[in-house]
């Protein structure tokens, strides 16, 4: 039923709960998980470190996706990607590009204002996606 599962992540507990669910789906269906971190270009994130320009959000995305991929069992194929852009547009475009059969997302992201914004991102993905979207709530909620 599922061959390609897209899991947008921000490294939050909610995203981890969604990923855990996606891993179960991937095992059952012998599917590939595409783990996607979107460095939001709507926010300033460029800084200079040691004379070179570094995008802090892209660096954070690389850290989050590599740490997340490493903690998963090796019996599930994981493709991790960091993209830049508007999160909603980028998630939808990436899902179409890889031919995702389902998008698995947490109901909320980080805490505070980021939690509200990522909850808003999930809600917008649910409304706009032509790909089925499975939302996962963290058990402690």
Image: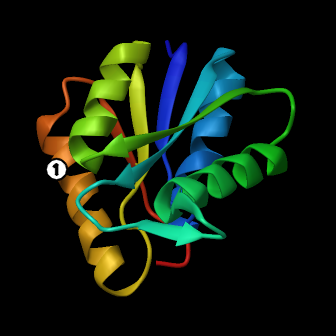
Foreground of the two, 19 or 94: 94
Going 66% across and 37% down the picture, which residue do you hit?
A: 23
- Marks counted in the figure total 1
Q: Quadrant location of residue 131?
A: top left
Residue 129 visible from this viewpoint: yes
Residue located farthest toward the bottom when viewing the structure as drawn: 112
Q: Secondary structure at mark 1?
A: helix
**What residue is disc 1 on?**
124
Question: Is residue 28 found left or right of 76 in the rendered image?
Answer: left
Residue located farthest toward the left when viewing the structure as drawn: 127
Foreground of the two, 79 or 4: 79
| Picture colour scheme | rainbow
- Vertical order, 34 against 13 (above or below): above
- Vertical order, 123 against 117 (above or below): above
Residue located farthest toward the right when viewing the structure as drawn: 74
Going 69% across and 15% down the picture, which residue do you hit?
A: 30
Going 60% across and 66% down the picture, which residue do you hit?
A: 51
Percent from the top left, x then y, of residue 6? 47, 32
Percent from the top left, x then y, of residue 65? 64, 48
Going 87% across and 32% down the picture, which residue do you hit?
A: 74
Residue 17 visible from this viewpoint: no
- Vertical order, 61 against 14 (above or below): above
Q: Quadrant location of residue 25?
A: top right
Would you call the spot at circle 1 few (<14 residues within 10 Å), some (14-19), or many (20 or more)?
Answer: few
Residue located farthest toward the front when viewing the structure as drawn: 51
């Amino acid at each position: 039923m599922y061959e390609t599962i897209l899991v947008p992540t921000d490294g939050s507990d909610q995203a981890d709960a969604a990923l855990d669910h996606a891993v179960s789906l991937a095992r059952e269906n012998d599917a590939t998980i595409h783990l996607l971190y979107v460095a939001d270009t709507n926010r300033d994130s460029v800084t200079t470190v040691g004379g070179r320009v570094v995008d802090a959000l892209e660096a954070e995305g690389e850290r989050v996706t590599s740490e997340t991929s490493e903690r998963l069992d090796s019996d599930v194929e994981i493709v991790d990607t960091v993209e830049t852009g508007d999160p909603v547009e980028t998630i939808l475009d990436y899902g179409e590009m890889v031919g995702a059969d389902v998008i698995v997302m947490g109901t909320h992201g980080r805490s505070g204002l980021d939690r509200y914004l990522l909850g808003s991102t999930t809600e917008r993905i649910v409304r706009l996606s032509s790909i089925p979207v499975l939302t996962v709530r963290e058990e402690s909620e």
